[in-house]
Each structure stands twice: as structure tokens, then as C-alpha cells.
Image (cartoon, rainbow, N blue to C red):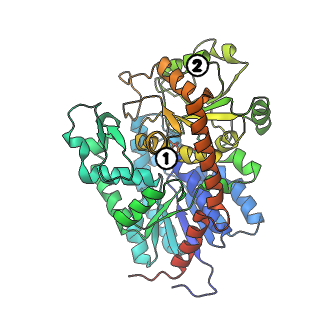
Amino acid sequence: MVSQDHQLHVMFLPYMAPGHIIPMVDMARLFAANGIRVTILTTTKNALPFQNSIARDVRLGRKISLETLRFPSVEAGLPEGCENMFQASSPEMYKLFFRALELLKPEFEHRFRQNHPDCIVSDYLYTWTVKLANELGIPRLAFSGSGFFNLCVSHNIDKYKPHEDIKSETENFVVPGLPDEVKLTRSQLPDIVKTKNEFSSLFEELKKAERDSFGVLVNSFYELEAAYIDHFTKDIKIRAWPLGPVSMFNKDINDKIERGGNSYVSKHSCLSWLDSREPNSVLYICFGSLTRFSKAQITEIACALEESGHSFVWVLGKVSDSKDGEFWLPERFQENVSERGLIISGWAPQILILEHPAIGGFLTHCGWNSIVEGVSAGVPMVTWPVFAEQFYNEKLVTQAMKFGVPVGNEFWKIWATDETRLIERYKIKKAVRGVMNNEDEALEMRKKASRLKELAKKAVEEGGSSYNYMKGLIQEIKFYKKA
Ligand code: UDP
């Protein structure tokens, strides 16, 4: 237990990928707004996108700082300056990136020992922080990059192995023991679930670390996944605190435009373009920070957008079939859609765009943050999962909560290759129409999404569920006694 007049000090260790570090910095800022002294431990380049927001927090009197160290890019065989998974342009580079993280571990440990905080909030992928926190006699909270729905689905697949009785890759099976009927196919499961591979031992370590932690922090809110939060905490019996949506902590317009990176569009041009559109008429398309499609797949998306006739904002990712990774569009596409399409070739201010009243739908890869951000903005979704736990997240939207339409991707694949099956333009068009056409089903989904937005807003307000979870958690850290 910490003495009454001591200001709690919590150290955050985010993983160096946008989908992890962005929500974790939001969460760290939330802790600081609740009177905690916060240190975020990261590397020089990874700190840059957050410096301005943190400086604004400090000016408001909050005790929050970024502590940086040098990323060993060159020592690990990566190009100088490559410090984030976002910059890796091949599966081989991912491996070098993991090597760099291994090299960093002793220095991270040293910084923790030097600071001796009252609590570590560690990305769940850094399993070694469990042992360290134990040695320091402090709680380790695991930041889960995903939501409770995913945590429950993956837990029950691992426990009951329903896919092992299924012969065909594309036959539906139901995941046992969940609050809803959740259907998946073998082809949608991550490789690691189906085969032993080089990551299998890491997977086991992650499960153990989750159990050995004080608990799990999740960017979600009770009303979004109530049955799954109960299932996770009461049946699977792991302590957890839903503290989100953490993106809602960004109230200042500059925080929104700068969140996670330098935006490729100016605040002014983006907002004035959106202001010129009718409410709910624009489809926002973004596949997160890591997805790369082939030129053939980009062509299918472009044709679907051209033929569908809707206005859109398309955050273009780099293509997979080019050596250095580049932005690519079919010839004349831009001229053909210049009246109704805004194309952002690079980082977009996602939450600023999503919450604009002109946005009527979100074509998403179902990264967990994107889903929570779409929910916070009250937009129905067109779902296009690609890899990681995205197929599980999709089912929350399309099967459990039913405020989205799937494009119908059936195949989990981490990196697009020549063999990756294309999602043809007619499928994309059909799903987009299903969300944007203003017919009864689409209006029903829009109503559900708006309702979720209201619930999200309430959750983070004083007295709301996430607000109360946060207050409760702070008390627990204060009164923590090593078992
Ligand atoms: N994001 C953004 N601008 C972009 C692309 C992504 O602000 O152009 C943010 C997005 O708002 C989200 C995060 O990056 O907070 C991506 O996380 P998510 O879990 O959705 O997907 P991932 O990138 O991890 O696949």
C-alpha cells in the first residue's frame, strides 16, 4: 500500500505499432487527467507524434512525460530510423523489428528499476514485464490491443477447438460457450490457431502473462460488450477494466488532427471538403496502419467506388506488390471521381473525419481501435477483415451487434501475395450499398450505431461506466499489496 500523500506514479510501455501506441498514449493521458503521475517509456521517433499533446497536458498542470531511448534499428539489421511496425515493408522486416525489441529489453528494464514506479501498464506483448513487476513488488496491468469480444472468442476457440472437427476450410462452425451465436470458418482463423509455428511458444507465453498479471486494461466500454466483459471476468476469471473509448479523451481539435502522426491533409481542407457534403452521405474507407493490398485489389476497390456513385474519403495504403511500398491508383481514377472523392495518400486524421456529420459509413479492416472509434462516432460499418484478430472483431459488428455488412472476405492472410484471393468489385459495391442506401435495414443499422455513440459518450462522462472503472482501478493500485 502507498502512503496517503504520495502521488501514484504509473509507467506505460507501449508496443511500437500505431494500433497499440495510439490508444495506450490516450490511456496514459487519461491516467494523468485523473491525478496520477505518468511516464510513457518509448523510443525517440515513436515519441514524436505525441509530444504536442503531452505538452498541452503539461500546460494544463498534469504530471505526464515521455521518457525516450534510442531504438537499435541498425544493430538489428533495419534501416536507420525504422522504429515502428508501420514502417516495415516486408514480413522479413517484421522479424528484424522483433529482434530490435529483444535488444531493447535490458535498457527498458533498467529504466523501470531506476524509476521504481507504483505500477506498470505494459502492452500485453511484453510478457517479460510480469517478472519485472513481481520483482519490484508492484502490479503489472496488461494493455490488451483488442476488445473483450476477441478475448472471449479466442479463449473459447483455444479451449474447445471447434475448428478441429471441421473438414472444409469454408464451412461455418459455431464458437461454443459464448453469449451469442458466433460463426466462423477455418479459413478466417489466424495461422497460429491452426498450426504450430514459430510464434506458438509466444502465444502460450502471452496467455500465461495475461493470467499472471494484476489484470487487463481494455479500450472498450461496458455497454458495448457487456455480456463479453462478464464472460471474461466471471467465467474465464481474469480481472479487467474497460476504460474507453479512449479516443474520446481527445477533445482539443489539435489533438484530433495530430493523433498518431502528421496528417497528409490539412485540417482546413479536410473539414471544408466534408462540410460541402450532405449529412450521412460520405463513405470513409481506411484499412488501418499495417494492411497492404495488391494493385489488383486496389483496382477492384476503385472500380467499386466509381460504380457505386457515393461520395467517399479513401485513406490509401501502400501497395504490397512494389519493392519499396508506394501509393498506387488505376489510371484516370482520380480524374473520374474528383467531384465526389477525397483521397488521402498517407496518414489521415481518422477521428476528426469519422465524427463529421457527413460521414454515413465506415469501410474498415476491423482493427479494434477503428471499430471503437467508429462506434464512438455512431457510424455503421462495411467490414473487411484481413488478418490478426480482425475476423473475430468483424463478428461483433455483423453477428452480435448487427450494425454492419461484411464484404465477405473469407481468408485470413497477413501479407498479400499473388495467391491472395481478390474481393471482387461487385461484392464491395453490394456491401457498400447495404450500408449507404438509406433503405430500412441500413436505417436500422444507423439507428443502432447512433445509440452506441450515445452510450459511449455516457460511459466516459462523470459517473459513467468507464469513468467509474478508472476511479476503482486507481484505488486498487493505491492499496495494492504484493500477495
Ligand atoms: N489511424 C489514423 N490515421 C490513419 C490510419 C490509422 O489515425 O490514416 C489510427 C486509427 O484511428 C486507429 C489506429 O491508427 O487509432 C489503427 O488501429 P487499428 O486497431 O484500427 O488498426 P491497426 O492499424 O492496428 O491494424
What is the secondary structure assignment of the residue under circle 2? Answer: loop
Residue for badge 1: 73
Image quarter where the C terminus lies is: bottom left
Q: Residue at x 59, y 46 (%)?
A: 375
Ligand 1 - quadrant of the structure image: top right
Q: Residue at x 71, y 18 (%)?
A: 338
**Disc 1, SS:** helix
The x, y position of residue 236, in whole percent, is 34, 62
Side (left or right) of 73 relative to 483: right
Q: Confirm or reject: label 1 Cβ below 8 Å from ligand 1.
A: no
Q: Is residue 124 visible?
A: no
Q: CA distance from mark 2 to mark 1?
A: 31 Å
The quarter holding residue 142 reads: bottom left
482 left or right of 301? left
Task: In this rendered view, identify the residue nearer to me: 133 or 476.
Answer: 476
Query: Of residues 80 and 415, which is closer to you in this image?
Result: 415
Q: Is residue 440 left or right of residue 154?
A: right
Q: Which mark is residue 329?
A: 2
Report the residue at 50% width, 38% height from top. 290
Pointer 1 local density, CA inside 10 Å: few below 14, some 14–19, many at least 20: many
Tell me, yes or no, whether the two marked residues, 2 and 1, touch with CB atoms within 8 Å.
no
Left or right: 236, with 108 as reference point: left
Which numbered disc flags the more N-terminal residue, 2 or 1?
A: 1
